[in-house]
Image: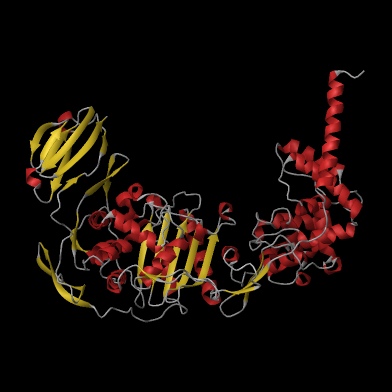
Amino acid sequence: MLNRAQLHFVLFVALLIGGTLFEINEDEIKLELPSLQRTVFLDREGEVLSRKYLGQWNHFPYSISDFPTVLIDALITSEDQRFNSHNGIDLRSKARAVWQNIKRGGIYQGGSTLSEQTVRIISTRKRTVWNRWIQMWQAWKLEKDFSKEEILSFYLNQVPFASHRRGFHQASELYFKRSLDTLSVKEILALVVLVKSPSRFDIRKGNQIEKSIMRLAGKLGLIEGIDDKLVLQSFPSNVQPSVDLYLDYLAKLVPSEADTVKTSIDRRIQLQAESLLSSKLKYLSKFGARNGALIVIDHRTSEVLSHVVVNDDENGLGYDTTLVPRQPGSTLKPFLYTLAFSKGYNTGSVISDTPVETTVAGGLHQITNYSHNYYGELTFREALANSLNVPAIKLVREVGEEKLYETLVKAGIPLEREVSFYGDGLALGNMEVSLMDMMKAWTCLARRGVCHNLRHFEEQYLEPESRLFTTESTDMTLDILSDPKARQKEFGRIEFDHQVGFKTGTSTDYRDSWAFVFNSKYLIGVWIGNLDGSSMDEITGSKGALKVGKTLIESRWLNTGAKFQMSPNLSRVQVCLETERGCDKREELSERDSVNVTLSAVENDEWKIQPDTDLLHLARDPRIPDHLEVMTFRTSGSGHENTIWKIDNKEVHNGSEFVFKLTQGEFVLEAISGQNKKRTKIYVH
């Protein structure tokens, strides 16, 4: 009679055997291939960029005799030394793997045979202990049904590498741009090493896998035939455009039946852009920058000419950085000013650059310019050209947060929250948006107010173009962004060898460096930062991204040498800006039929209160004497001098300013002037 423990053991074994047999028979493993979609991508001149294998398999297998003997020997030595003698399961290898994992305190080896790996290539099972157990016995059954040569041939043709490539022949073309039979011994060994982790190494940086290559060469007795001093020469520089991530993106857009797709990529521009961004990122790495992205378009046709991703860290491997949402900083200010121009303002309209506050989560936040300087009264031209934050906040309050929100959405900026969530921070780019979406939005400006989806390939269906701004309002913005004199207050002298406009952006704590650079034909967008969100060491848009954009747009391929078009409805007029030294004469743009050709301040007679908020949290500072801990509220506009101030429904003051003394507690402040009324809940902590 079996005791309870023995009975449980017998039951466990029975269930294990029964479950294993059921799983093996239910999930039959065959060395057969389903249908495959293969698409060849060409550049704009018809040259092959890449062949994208969008299905799971390589449907162009080679005979085992077409694989070099040294490759087969190296693969068996590296992955499964007893391949020719075991029955699909190598218990010695598994025991050794278990012992090594125990000694090293983790999972470092699996002891899988090539037959087990073949099962995993075919099977869609998730990576669990139970599934590994089943796959081990499926490997045993696989060897009962197929010969060693058939299994090895399947593996050599179907083992996965990076960028959807399958098999060693495709891997050879991917990494070395040459056929497998032309590779050196070292290059063949490199491919074998990559089998263990195709996404972990960059074969173009040979020193990363040098030790693994030389270790394998030693096991094969080939160490003397490999010159370890010439590793980098064995891995030639990549003369082909690195567009695999971009083509992964395009693969989702092309028709499913497409065999060949002619993209808009310009090979010359692509290679130059890759070189420039890589070089700049290498230099900026000492300032904490590790990731970058760049897109070039012909804004007349909206064709994408270049798509570059440079990720110099393991966290960025496999990420198309052009699709990752980031804070755009000041790069959206041109949309705000163009919106203002469409409402009757001109480049000479005046706005005050004086301290202003905004509320964030019930607290007050002082808006400052990047330099922490305030310049007093400025023209719109100076305020935008110098990317000043204070005037931008004042202007968005004037034209309306809702109007700017609607404008950005129409331009293609995906704003997922309501306008109240962003508030006046819309003017400073307090949302997250990808470089790809930003390029679509910026075409609205570069195309002089007309929006058009980006064109990636010849047969792409595009929605009809739509007008977002008037030609005149956009031309005023483009004129400002290409005016080198107007931006000197904050940027100093930044000049180009032909008419070029630009706008930079820097997010909080130097997490993002942006630049959009354009001339009469081309638009360049550049982003530099870190995908993990970490800060860089004071890398602004002008210190990082702009340097790349400037060099590229002045290159032989993008330098048009042409000036911008200007609407005939615009004229340059002499205006006078009153300063302490008298009349400061300057030339500004205005519409010919506009009544307002002189300077107009962005101020109107509407009654307003500052700070304008429904909720306010204030904290007392024990280091400051009680009588000095105060908060001043101000009103402006029609009737502001007669504002009545109430605290908890009790009148306490009459006038345009009220000094509120900070006393711990909860209060309701009311400001009343005729029909105007503002109520603010105040918590003093």
Q: Residue drawn 75% across and 44% down?
A: 109
134 displayed left or right of 627: right
Q: Nearer the viewer, residue 33 or 439?
A: 33
Q: Is residue 407 above or below residue 261?
A: above
| Residue 630 seen anywhere in this rendered image of the structure | no
Residue 490 image-quadrant placement: bottom left
Please provide percent x and percent y for residue 85.
Answer: 92, 51
Q: Give the vertical position of 124 relative to 35 (above or below).
A: above
Residue 189 position by quadrant: bottom right
- Looking at the image, which residue is at 71% across and 72% down? 178
| Residue toward you, 449 or 298 | 449
Q: Is residue 228 left or right of residue 521?
A: right
Question: Which of 351/216 is in front?
Answer: 351
Task: Indicate the quadrant containing the N terminus: top left, top right, bottom left or bottom right.
Answer: top right
Q: Position of residue 236 (x, y in %)?
A: 66, 69
x, y percentage for residue 423?
31, 49
